[in-house]
Amino acid sequence: MHMEESVLITGATSGIGEATARLLAEKGYPLILTGRRRERLETLAENLKSATGQAVCTLCFDVRNQEETARAIESIPPSFHPIGVLINNAGLASGLDPLHEGDLSDWEKMIDTNLKGLLYVTRQIAPMMVARGKGHIVNISSIAGKETYPMGNVYCATKHAVQSLTKAMRLDMLKHGIRVSSVAPGAVHTAFSEVRFHGDHERAEKVYQGFTPLNGRDVAEAIHFILSRPAHVCIDDLLIMPSAQAYSRDFNREQ
Ligand code: NDP
Ligand code: 8X3
């Protein structure tokens, strides 16, 4: 992509999205950063602008709300167009329960964010790419999009859907010159587990004990690799795991 095209990252206030914003700013990409937490977004944007001199704009909205999403994307200043890359990263797991004991509000959150939110954002941005005959969409999937693990039920189903939608986008936009990629990480040490366990920090930290998980920067570097391939190369699907994790629930932990 040309550096005058901007990159829109959803869920840039934390974890993988924030690390990707930092790396891409260092690499010289103009950025549109989104999330619900306004203060974190604005602080990050100010830091990146002063550290890298990069153009950064922020959009504060909830991807679950279709009208808010549409309004926010319509408000992107002209200087941040065209949008060359969309990184659909905003997402979460909520709860880890057997299906027959699942909490319906956890299910709604995951389906509305990981699936409907990704679709709402893509539906706004993809037509602009199609009109230009150019663009790249990167969907953040998960090892949970490749395998189903006990009590992962609805989260795994949303990430399997992200894998399926990635293929669907690739097929539907093939003739319009749009590249579509998915990145499926194993365990990444972010706020993910704390969100999954509804703020239980101690339980969340146990997920990452006894081995070295991925960090946000590891995934950001994989995304940058995908974006920096020449125009004739599309990385369709990239699975990235900690060396000490070989399957969704198989870890080589210290005794
Ligand atoms: P974090 O919790 O650290 O970050 C999640 C980001 O998503 C935040 O910036 C949050 O912003 C944003 N987000 C969540 N809900 C919404 C919403 N309704 N509207 C807008 N933004 C939202 O977790 P990660 O960085 O780990 O997660 C990023 C992606 O990576 C997710 O899709 C996750 O499923 C995926 N993933 C994570 C793995 C891991 O082990 N950590 C492994 C594989 C995939 P805010 O709260 O400000 O809205
Ligand atoms: C996050 C990784 O294994 O907890 O997608 O589902 S996992």
Image (cartoon, helix red, strand yellow):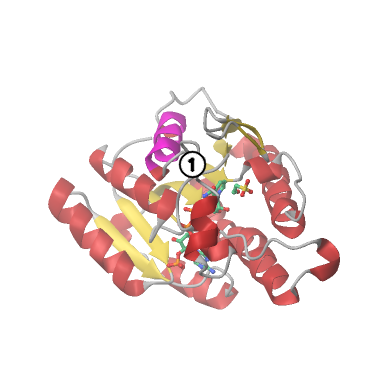
- Residue at the (72%, 54%) spot, across then down: 152
* Residue 164 rendering spot, x and y as whole percentages: 73, 44
Q: What span is in magenta?
A: 217-226
* Residue 62 rendering spot, x and y as whole percentages: 51, 72
Q: Amino acid at mark 1?
A: Gly
* Residue 61 rendering spot, x and y as whole percentages: 45, 72
Secondary structure of the residue carrying tag 1 is strand
Q: Is residue 90 above or below residue 135?
A: below
> Is residue 90 visible to us here?
no
- Residue at the (45%, 52%) spot, across then down: 190
- Residue at the (38%, 35%) spot, across then down: 1
Sort mark 1 into few (<14), some (14-19) or many (20+) by Cα contacts within 10 Å: many
How would you classify the magenta stretch by its main secondary structure?
helix
Q: Is residue 65 above or below residue 175?
A: below
Q: Is 224 part of what is drawn in magenta? A: yes
According to the picture, the residue beneath numbered tag 1 turns out to be: 135
Q: How many marks?
A: 1
* Residue 15 rendering spot, x and y as whole percentages: 42, 53
The quadrant the C terminus occupies is: top right
